[in-house]
Amino acid sequence: MEDQSSAPDGSAVRRPARDRLRGDPKVRRGLARRLGFFVLSALALFPRPAVGQSRDAEHYQLLLKTKAHVKGIATIGGNIGVTAPGGLLAIGHNSTVADGRELVADKVYVRNYTRAFDVFANIPHVGRGGVVAGAIIAPILPPIYDPEPLVMPDPFDPANFPAAFPITCSGTNRAGRPGEIFTLTPGSYGKVTVGPNGKLVLQAGTYQFCSLEVVKYGGIFADAPATINVRDIFLIGSSSAFVPVGNPSDIQINVQGPLARVGSYSTFSGRIFAPNAKLRIGGLALVTGHMVAKQLTTDAAPQMFTCGNGRLDAGEQCDTSAPNGDAACPGTCVPPGQPNECTCSTPPTTT
């Protein structure tokens, strides 16, 4: 099929249809998508050597053993790493990873229309409309993932578990009534449940629980420093909160069982170490701190590790990126990207 146009002398010139089609906006967009695919393929064929990925567990706000699936429309302000060889990290569509943050795994998938920053992977994949604003570093050189895990010493090796493991529990069960506010002192308990619209206050110290759960619309307020050891299940239900009173980095939750969950529309700030658990984060949940788990799944639109996003969020003592964000501890707020970020390295003021 051909098209006709005029030559300078007025005679007709036949132009192949493919030349005419190249001027079509839809065709140009299609060519651009193909070009993007070939560019990414070239990165895989001619990768840059791996530099800079950390092997320190504290470098990652979220560290998983085998896999992490973050659903779409997520806001991610922290480094995420999957430590096992063959591990998978997938960030859902239309999500945003903050500048300067890293996604590290043997296989990393940045889904359609998602914006990431630095990607470290042996097998990177960027979906249609996806953007890697920093760099794709591939492959990751041995011994990382071949044969060693990313983080060494391996935090998922039972030999490296905290002294609290194996976690034991004994004592009475406590089921809070709807709207009830109650306080527990350090010690050992059975199954403890916070009722709807209820509140549990944990004084500073060390606790042993068989399970610790907030049903919904409730909260747990933990005075720092505190260590909360849970043998079975740790659950913050929908529209609920786990709130540190004091420095969130001084609240450590150890979970031995198969599930740790922060429900939809809930907030959590603190540290979780759950090496055998699936970590579940509900839709529109806001989580800050440091989390280690066997695997992760989220519902849509979670907000994870918001330190450095330009505003002071729930669970943050301070945020140097926010206007007047260090008012609680001028000059001593730990900046974004550092261990214990967005906390006060000295006690915050109360005036």
Image (tube, rainbow, N blue to C red):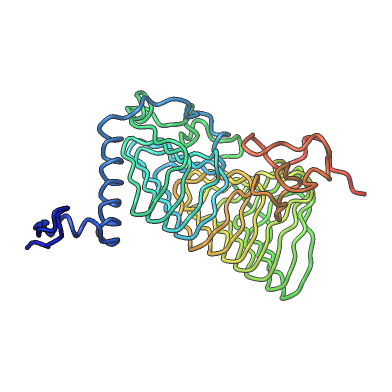
Task: Answer yes or no: is residue 348 visible.
Answer: yes
Name the spot of residue 201 as percent of width and height, x first: 77, 58
Seen as rendered, the residue at the extreme left is 1
Q: Position of residue 120 (x, y in %)?
A: 41, 35
Asked if residue 175 is positioned above or below residue 245 in the image, the reply reads: below
Please state which of residues 122 and 136 is positioned toward the viewer in this rendering.
136
Residue 348 percent location from the top left of the image: 84, 43
Give the x, y percent position of residue 89. 40, 46
* Residue occupying image coordinates x 78% and y 49%: 223
Q: Residue furthest right?
A: 351
Q: Is residue 23 left or right of residue 152?
A: left
How many labels, in total? 0
The image shows residue 286, relative to residue 39, as above or below, that is below
Quarter of the figure with the N terminus: bottom left
183 on left or right of 291: right
Identified at 46% across, 43% down, the residue is 64
Between 111 and 145, the residue placed more toward the observer is: 111
Q: Nearer the viewer, residue 238 or 52?
A: 52
Q: Residue at x 37, y 43 (%)?
A: 108
The quarter of the displayed image where residue 261 is located:
bottom right
Residue 204 appearing in the image? no
Q: Residue furthest bottom?
A: 178
Frontmost residue, 212 versus 303: 303
* Horizontal relation, residue 254 to residue 135: left or right: right
Q: Quadrant of residue 58?
A: top right
